[in-house]
Amino acid sequence: MRRLEIILSRLVWFIPTLFGLVFVVFFISNVIPTDPARIIAGENATEVQVQALRAEMGLDQPLHVQFGRYVADLATGDLGKSLYTQRAISEDLLHRLPATLELTMAAMVLAIGLGVPLGVISAVKRNSMIDQTLRVLSVSGLAVASFWLAMELQMYFSTKLGWTPLNGRIAGWGPEEITGFYLLDSLLTGDWASFWDTLHHMLLPAITLALPAAATLVRFTRAGVLEVINSNFVLYERAMGFPTTLITWKYVLRNALISTVTQIGLIFGSLFAGAVVVEAVFDWPGLGTYAVQSILQSDTKAILGFSIIVGVVFIGVNLLVDIIHTFIDPRTLK
Amino acid sequence: MTALKRLLADRAATIGAALILGLILVAIFAPVLAPYPEDVTAFHLTERLQPPSADHLFGTDRMGSDVFSRILFGARITITIAVIAVGVSVGIGVPIGLIAGYYGGFPGGFLMRTSDIFLAVPQIVLAIAIAQTLGPSVENVILALSLTYWPFWARLVYAETKSLKAQTFVEAALALGASDWRVMVLHILPNTASAIIVRTSIGMGATILTAAALGFLGLGAPPPTPEWGRTISEAREFLPEAWWYAAAPGLAIFLVVMGFNLLGDGLRDILDPKLRKGSR
Amino acid sequence: MTDALLTVEGLSLGFRGDGGFAHILDGANMTMKRGEIMGLVGESGCGKTTLASAILGVLPRHALEIRGGRIRFDGIDMLDAAQGAQQQAVRGRRVTFIPQDPFTSLNPVFTIGQQIEELMKWKSPRRPVGPSRAPTLLTPYPRARRKADREKIMEMLNLVQLPRPEQLLKKYPHEVSGGQRQRLMIAMALLPEPDLIIADEPTTALDVTIQAQILGLLRNLANDRGVAVMLTTHDLGSAYEICDRITVMYAGQDVEAAPVAEFFNRPTHPYTAKLLASLPEGGGGMTGIPGELPSFYAPPPGCRFQTRCDRATEACRTRPAPDLAGPAHVVRCAHPLFQTTPATPLKEVQA
Ligand SMILES: Nc1ncnc2c1ncn2[C@@H]1O[C@H](COP(=O)(O)OP(=O)(O)O)[C@@H](O)[C@H]1O
Ligand SMILES: [Mg+2]
């Protein structure tokens, strides 16, 4: 089974890449050691108290020993304790992951729903007014700082017009938690009020995130369509009188999407990256806000845990993309 | 010269080049151009949050300083960060890609796997992790960006070198007794130059956006530095009334990044027809 | 010529590009009768594919400039944009296509079965005429017809001698050999039960050993069903083997057309004669005729062969009218190799 082989060969790299990531982030973040013990103990603690705390936290050990302990803990899913929430970081992160995933996936759906059709239209009508306009828009979409766009949209649509909620993920408590994905949970429990409220809250952050991604997709889809639109099989389909709509939206698009799908991993990464700052603006209770809070509190371990979980998700998504690729392009299985 | 002509024939690329030229001129002549150069550090609390007027083109900020002047000086920070960070990234990434692509085998594989690790998380996440531990300063932002962006150039040069290495002119040079170093530096590197230039232009845009995001998150230069990202975050609590306060730096970032992206696209069309497919 | 199925009259077209206007077809004429196999012969680059593509309506629209002429298929003007709906209905149904390169002419990301089925969904002879009411992408494929079509597909795959058709339908194009793919294209060309198949060098991309098989197959199936075939080829040998009639084209102009026996016995245009003389013993491609095709950007006025012709004179600088060199043997030459008589005035459509 060729597909299985491809998947396994990717999986083999999962662990070393993750290990490397931990290694890199751990050592870089320890180049200039801030002193977490000092921070926890507080301004007024005596040197002896700080020493004791340091020993308790293992901070008096040499770096490689600390690293060994960190990795050993990581293997059991333990990322350490958050300096401030005093909860397990892994718990904090897992609790917040669904919020971020839900937002990025919504943005992804939006970006695909917008970017792919517009890319096709842009290619089919190349050099027309529509094409030119879309080109300007997509170049612009890639040049906007997402946190700024987030603020501007928030200012206009929430503060001024009052069309959308100012921030947060839902008003009130949210649906009964099953998966942590509010949209899914509210559907599962039949809680329509929560469903619409979540969508309403999600609208602006998702749009903000989706715009640059959609811009990328427009460019890629356009290029992909142009690449196949003159190929022999399209010529054959036209010569055989297949309906033009069918040729464009089924036969050409499917081929063009092959190169687009390989980009989806990257796009997902950019959405995740964007989420960090966009969440902060909209107070979306996901990983991004958690990271920003941790930054403000110099919580190195929490940041480290955050990078790792993002890495895991990111590597996982790329793996998924590779697998999807084997389905939509049968030639990879040759 | 013909390359320049063709660049100028491309409207988008010309606009891009003009925007970048504008940025450079603004950065150099900020003290001359700024109506209130002292406002980078000075404040006038009686004139807080004034809307745009003839005196203050983009209004004033929470300290009563002239936003326009601060934006002009902010160009200096942006360009410094982008140029040094990208320069260092190129300096790390290109040799690594060259060596990995040329020698291949275990060392090549190792170097490329290492770069994969850096690509395993979005750049901003890694940059946050690094900048956070180093503490807020322009130098640390530069360091964080350099450490996170080099793999882009390594990957690019790696792929180019691998394909160039198989070509006859390289084999010919080797047959004539040229050393590995000589072949790499004199024969392969020049042929990867156009790809590097294109990627560098687009990389500048990406780096500027990430740097601004770090500034926005409070990881950049501390106040009162007129960094654009930080200015936007400062403006936040005064929205929507003081709309100009956030609009001006946001537009500045937009124009500059747009400039690099447009120029990069134009350069790609001219220098690297095989990349013309529209990929980034 | 009441039984003409397809006529191309004075077709003149070319492509605009960086180098100016490439005037490819210059007053090209061609006729096809029902049920005949007609070979369109000429060196590569002489415009065979361009003519075939013009009939099929697949010339690159952005660069194309049609300067004059007509293509009529059974009363339908195939160039008139106003008749787009009829053209679309004819294509793939009454006129089908066998491409030159079976390797790249099937969509690589759909199975062979999916592609044949799509063809039959739209172009099956059992499909009621007229446009469907549902939006294209949502048009259903009625179950009863699908089943009937399916049977015909299996039958046809057997006829073109494709082994194990059930499995074949599940495969992707890259998983089958070139010869099999071309058998498949023949099957797909026949399944809509067309009146005319346009086969553009259907064997050039194939292994020499199977070229004859494929052509033989095409000829037999077409003859059995009374389907006309327009076969373009640069290979006079295979044209001789399977065609009823031959039209010779040079640089976008038709120069001679005749039934196959007449054609080989009495080649009347100097170009045809040179072609035949250059034919190596035992068939094969065309080899050296001295000289080169003229540039399509600045072709000589009149007969385009004049730059390579020993008999060329001043008279050749205007295009000679069609003459008859025998029954149904048309030649356009000011200095023919055999006696000719003026043909019954054929209406010239000029740009
Ligand atoms: N889209 C086009 N633009 C410009 N020239 C073209 C185009 N398509 C074909 N040609 C030119 O038309 C001439 C005839 O080509 P073609 O019809 O493919 O010849 P054949 O099929 O007889 O080998 C060639 O010189 C070719 O270069
Ligand atoms: Mg051809």
Image (cartoon, helix red, strand yellow):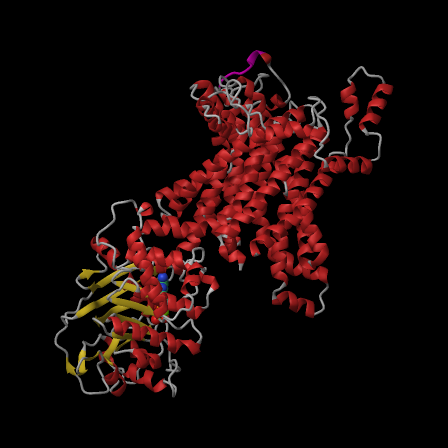
- Residue B167, visible in the rendered structure: yes
Q: Please report the residue visible at 65 percent of the width from the left and 23 percent of the height from the top.
A: B223
The residue most toward the top is: B46
Q: Please report the residue visible at 56 percent of the width from the left and 38 percent of the height from the top.
A: A270
Residue B180 versus residue B116: which sits nearer the camera?
Answer: B116
Rendered position, C97 above or below C281 = above
Q: Please report the residue visible at 42 percent of the width from the left and 69 percent of the height from the top.
A: C163
In this picture, residue C195 sits left or right of residue A281: left
Instruction: Tell me how many marks there are.
Output: 0
Rendered position, B166 above or below A308 = below
**Position in image of residue A155 (x %, y %):** 48, 22
Q: Where's the N terminus of chain A, which quadrant?
A: bottom right
In this picture, residue A255 sits left or right of residue C11: right
Q: Which residues are magenta?
A: B46-51
Name the quadrant where ligand 2 sits: bottom left
Looking at the rendering, which quadrant does residue A306 occupy?
top right
**Position in image of residue A16 (x %, y %):** 70, 46
**Position in image of residue A49 (x %, y %):** 84, 19
Q: Is residue A214 magenta?
A: no
